[in-house]
Amino acid sequence: MTGPFTAELRDSLEGARYIYVTTYSQAGKPGTVPTWCWLYDDALYFTTQRASLKAKRIRNGGRVTVNVGTKDGPAFEGHAEWVDDRPDLEAAILRSYRRKYWVLVPLWMGRYIRKGLLAKTSVLIRILATTR
């Protein structure tokens, strides 16, 4: 079951430049990578290559653990899923990234992310917090 982020976690996510996403293999083996993030409508988003290990693990199960800011930052358990055919969200995440990561996105990464989403070599990932 998923639910909204706590106020404290939402504040941490809004101020974070990075999250550390741990995905799990079908056998339960974890793998953690840092990524940029975007908080929108009680969900956390990021983009990744469709062929990446984290994208494959998310597609196969969706269980994630997210640490905010650093590997040891505030953490939550979540469920991640691919978000396809949402150009409105893709455009909004790119606008947000331009403001948040103002040097890298306008100079290089924005074009790379946009091209990947348009070519369907990248995918938008949505993470919702899980509740017990």
Image (cartoon, grey):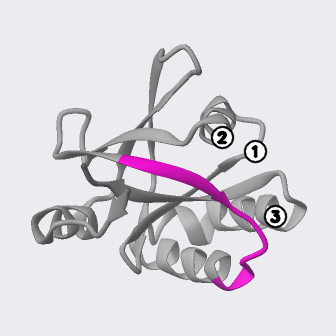
- Residue tagged by mark 2? 55
Q: Which mark is residue 115?
A: 3
Where is residue 41, by image quadrant? bottom left
Considering the numbered disc 1 on the image, is that residue within a helix, a strand or a loop? loop
Which x, y percent locates residue 84? 75, 66
Q: Residues within 10 Å of mark 3 (few under 14, many from 20)?
A: few
Q: Quick one: label 2 or label 3, which is nearer the N terminus?
A: 2
Q: Quick one: label 2 or label 1, which is nearer the N terminus?
A: 1
- Asked if residue 90 lies in the magenta stretch, the reply is no
The front one of 98 and 32 is 32
**Looking at the image, which residue is at 10% across and 65% down?**
8
The front one of 96 and 120 is 120
Q: Which mark is residue 50?
A: 1
Q: Is residue 32 above or below residue 3?
A: above
Closer to us: mark 3 or mark 1?
1
Q: Amino acid at mark 3?
A: Lys
Question: Range of the magenta residues?
Answer: 78-88
